[in-house]
Amino acid sequence: MIRTNLSTRPFYNERAVRTWLLVAAVIVALATIFNITRVLRYSRSDTELAGQASRDEASANELRQQAFRLRATVDPRQIDFASNEARQANDLIDRRTFSWTELFNLFETTLPDDVRITSVRPQIDKDRGIVLNVTVVSRSNEDVRSFMDRLAETGAFPAVQPLEEHTDDAGMWQTSLEAVYAPSGTKPAAVGAARR
């Protein structure tokens, strides 16, 4: 058996190599076309976005200048005057919503037999809401404590504390109380501010 190649020109399978090279060239050409279209699309989009950004920046500058001109025409005294007027209107509204009947009904249900109320002064506190200064007269300090506990149990008085206690010439306890009052019609924000 002869194992040598006797042909002068050996046979190579060039068709398979050419086919693979052609497939590779087509893939490279398709990838190149895809990349070129993407680059063109993104550059067009980038140009549009840059134009939009410059238009938006110009609009923002124009609005800033307009706001500056408007601020220059506003008189600070007019702003202060309008602010004071609004504050007074809000105070009047707060006073209008205060119900003496509801307050005295609460006092009637919580007042012990040996305690008398001699004065009630409501005030509007910006942070706490309605604050009552209540002066009571009682036979003992325990009666006043009982009254304070009963007020707190109603839920309408989130904070009750004595300010001053002393006995008068007749031997009666005279106590000044401060109570934050959150009636049922009070807005929750005011109640929350009162509980701080």
Image (spheres, helix red, strand yellow):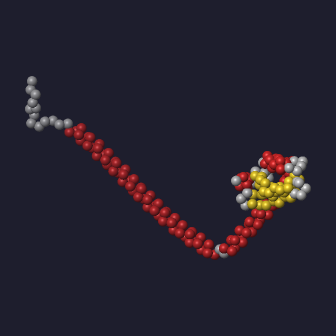
Whether residue 13 is visible to the viewer of this picture, yes or no, is yes
Quarter of image, res 130? bottom right
Q: Residue furthest top?
A: 1
Q: Which residue is at 79% across, 53% downward?
A: 183
Q: How many marks?
A: 0
* 120 to the left or right of 59: right
Vertical relation: 52 (above or below) 116: below
23 or 192: which is nearer to us?
192
Q: Which residue is at 79% across, 61% downward?
A: 123
Vertical relation: 184 (above or below) 73: above
- Residue 114 appears at what percent x and percent y? 89, 49
44 or 64: which is nearer to us?
64
- Residue 34 appears at what percent x and percent y? 37, 50
Quadrant of the image containing the N terminus: top left
46 or 162: which is nearer to us?
162
Quarter of image, res 79? bottom right
Q: Which residue is at 59% across, 74% downward?
A: 69
Vertical relation: 104 (above or below) 68: above
Whether residue 189 is visible to the viewer of this picture, yes or no, is no
Quarter of image, res 87? bottom right
54 or 97: which is nearer to us?
97
* 49 to the left or right of 133: left
* 73 to the left or right of 143: left
